[in-house]
Image (spheres, helix red, strand yellow):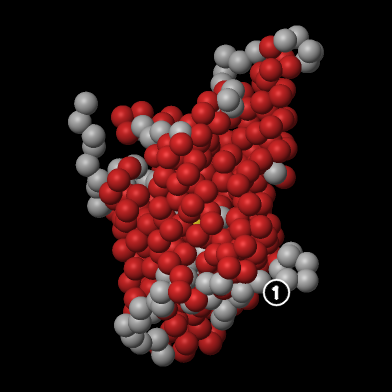
Amino acid sequence: MTTPSNRFDLPELAGAFGDLGTLIPFVVAYISLLKMDASGILLAFGASLIGVGLFYKTPFPVQPMKATGAAALTQTAGAVVLTPAMVAGAGLATALIWIALAATGLAKRLAQWVPKPALLGVVMGLGFSFMLEGLRMMAASWAVSAALLVGTLVLLARSRLPAMLVLLVVGAVLAVIQQPALADDLALIKPALRLPAFAWPSLSWQDLWLGTVLLALPQLPLTFGNALIAITEENNRLFPDRKVSERRVAFSTGLLNLCSSAIGGIPMCHGAGGMAGHVKFGARTGGASIMLGAVLLVLALFFADSVGTLFRLFPAPVLGVILFLAGAELAIGSRDPGAEKAERFVVLATAAIGILNVGVAVIFGLLAHHASKRGWLKI
């Protein structure tokens, strides 16, 4: 069977922006709160997206690691003041962990222990969590958000126009209307070539240790559930002609974090919700990832100092709509019509727990599945 080639057409371009709901808020927060260099963050994302698009030839996503980001950005490390160096240290530790899991084959063996009902529950729970986060982002402006959501659904169902591109244009117009000073700020933007600094020489053992303990290790369960098990299932369900293995996904997770930490970027992973977002808005090949990566590379190299201003063109209601529809796409795909009642319970209960904690959901789903098979679970 011949592997389909990457496409670079309008649907792929529209689908390329289907994961902005997770990318933009985290990037803006890292830049504004931890004062990290936008050039290193965006260059890492851009290069990684181009790499996975060329390698996997599906709309494979690259996302910020959410548990790490939440810990870093809310300063939940007690008395420790988190720094950009510790974030880079966390990325390096993450890279080494996932490369080791891939090289030893442990990533594949661990993934094989997770039964199908638990897997479907994890995917469904991730979808629900994306939908809830999208609703929270839309809550500040319900009228505008409702209009954008309805309009996007109509375009997706009945129009040949790429819904995502229309949504982004409308969002940019709304942003300029709601923020009168934005147009003047945009007019002041000028391209200026700037490369990120090499981060590893400045890392201390303390940066590496604290980054590992406070940021990298707490992320592992979520990455295992979302960025290894769920993304492998989602990719292979949607693109059976371009299947991936857990070992490959673990290795690419390690590799992209290795590159990111070297240039002062943030910990990254492959998230199933990101693929759902790309697919929902039209992407079917790695061309979407490559085009988004190219855009981010241009921003990193020439507009790093203006990223905060440019991202103001994407208001919260627009990002919320994107996130909500990506979550719906992910949750809809996690179905098994032929499942027995006990198995459906495992799926739904795992999904409910997955909204709060993916790692705990995996463990619950595994235990509940085996309990139902042994007759210990009566529903």
Quadrant for the C terminus in the image: top right
- Nearer the observer, 292 or 188: 292
Residue visible at 58% across and 36% down in the picture: 123
| Residue closest to the eye, 239 or 197 | 197
Report x, y in % for residue 27: 53, 68
Q: Position of residue 300 (x, y in %)?
A: 38, 73
**Above or below, 92 relative to 240:** below
Query: Which residue: 71% across, 38% down?
Result: 360
Q: Is residue 259 above or below residue 253?
A: below
For this rendering, which residue is in front, 363 or 345?
A: 363
The image quarter containing residue 341 is: top right
At 46% from the left and 70% from the top, the residue drawn is: 200
Whether residue 141 is visible to the viewer of this picture, yes or no, is: no
Q: From where the camera sits, is residue 225 visible?
A: yes
Relative image position of residue 68 (x, y in whole percent): 62, 58
- Secondary structure beneath dot 1 equals loop
In-image side of 280 versus 365 (left or right): left
Tell me the residue at 65%/64% (across/down): 210
> Within 10 Å of the Cα at label 1, are there few (<14), some (14-19), or many (20+) other Cα atoms?
few
Choose top left, top right, bottom left or bottom right for residue 16.
bottom left
Quadrant in which the N terminus is drawn = top left
Residue located beneath label 1 in the image:
81
- Give residue 261's position: percent from left, percent from top: 47, 64
Q: Amino acid at mark 1?
A: Val
Residue occupying the far front of the picture? 205
Q: How many marks?
A: 1
Q: Does 322 sit left or right of 33 as displayed?
A: left
Q: Which residue is farthest top?
A: 375
